Image: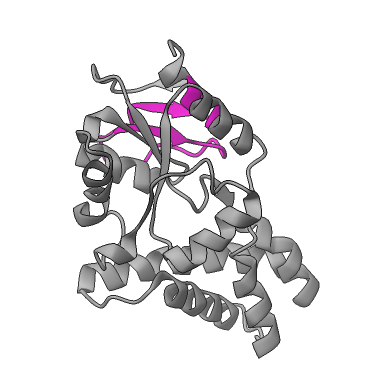
Amino acid sequence: MTNAAETDAQPKAVLFDAYGTLFDVHSVVELAERHLPGYGASLSQLWRDRQIEYSRLCSMSGRWRPFSEITRAGLRQAALRLKLALAADVEAALMAQYQALAPYAENAEVLRALCARGVRCGILSNGDRAMLEPLLRHCRFEALIDPLLCAETVRRFKTDSAVYDLGPRALGLRAEEILFVSSNGWDAIGATWYGYTTLWVNRSDAPLESLDTSPTRIGRSLRDVLDFFSDR
């Protein structure tokens, strides 16, 4: 694990980003490839890029749409960019896959270890509750996650401070007492600016965002969360 700007506060709880952090958004590739041979990986990447871009655009413009709608719009735009005909049944199948995304291999082990140490583990996500609850059930994580905090509550998306505000309010803790974990570098930076203790799970060995800001720590897998609670 790489240490960046350390904080003196000892985290008392953990909030995880969902998409890309606990759940692999690119686990749609196999299904996409089955329906659209030769385009599975490129469709998945463009879909994710449009999803994030549309969430920012809607949030910054005050044009709220549920994340499920933004996800569907991102899929359609990705298909248009690749000049693919997206049949209604294929669109429905790919959207349904968002409720059955694969968790990263180490996640269940880490969540159970944190719960065994008495650390409260929640999710703070752009995703709608109606998207996330079936996914948690699918992965059998529902008993390990509390609270489930969704951006729809404030009708904004990350990195708006109104979304990050949900964590301290729900947990009754100061932001620096909460470890916020994300595999999305932009999200880790936004949460750091907000005041959380942060861990960027940099699975792809990507460069740090060029914004003169570093997360509290940088790791390579969710197992690096446990280092924050090694004395428990």
Q: Quadrant of the C terminus?
A: top left
Q: Is residue 38 left or right of residue 225?
A: right
Instruction: Please say whether residue 118 is one of the residues in the magenta stretch.
Output: no
* Residue at screen point 62% across, 84% down: 83
Q: Is residue 201 left or right of residue 112?
A: left
User: Which residues are drawn in magenta?
Assistant: 197-226
**Is residue 210 at all visible to an observer of this figure?**
no
Query: Above or below — where is 148 with respect to 154?
Result: above
Q: Position of residue 222 (x, y in %)?
A: 54, 32
* Residue at screen point 56% across, 83% down: 80
Which color scheme is applied?
one colour
**Is residue 2 at all visible to an observer of this figure?**
yes
Q: Nearer the viewer, residue 100 or 87?
A: 100
* Residue at screen point 20% across, 56% down: 162
* Residue at screen point 35% across, 31% down: 13
Query: Above or below — where is 168 with respect to 174?
Result: below
Q: Position of residue 97 (x, y in %)?
A: 65, 67
The picture quadrant where one finds residue 38 is bottom right
The residue furthest top is 231
Q: Nearer the viewer, residue 149 or 20?
A: 149
The picture quadrant where one finds residue 217 is top left
Q: Position of residue 226 (x, y in %)?
A: 49, 22
The picture quadrant where one finds residue 8 is top left
Total numbered circles: 0
Instruction: Please say whether residue 213 is one of the residues in the magenta stretch.
Output: yes
Q: Position of residue 161 (x, y in %)?
A: 20, 52
Query: Above or below — where is 32 with respect to 113?
Result: below
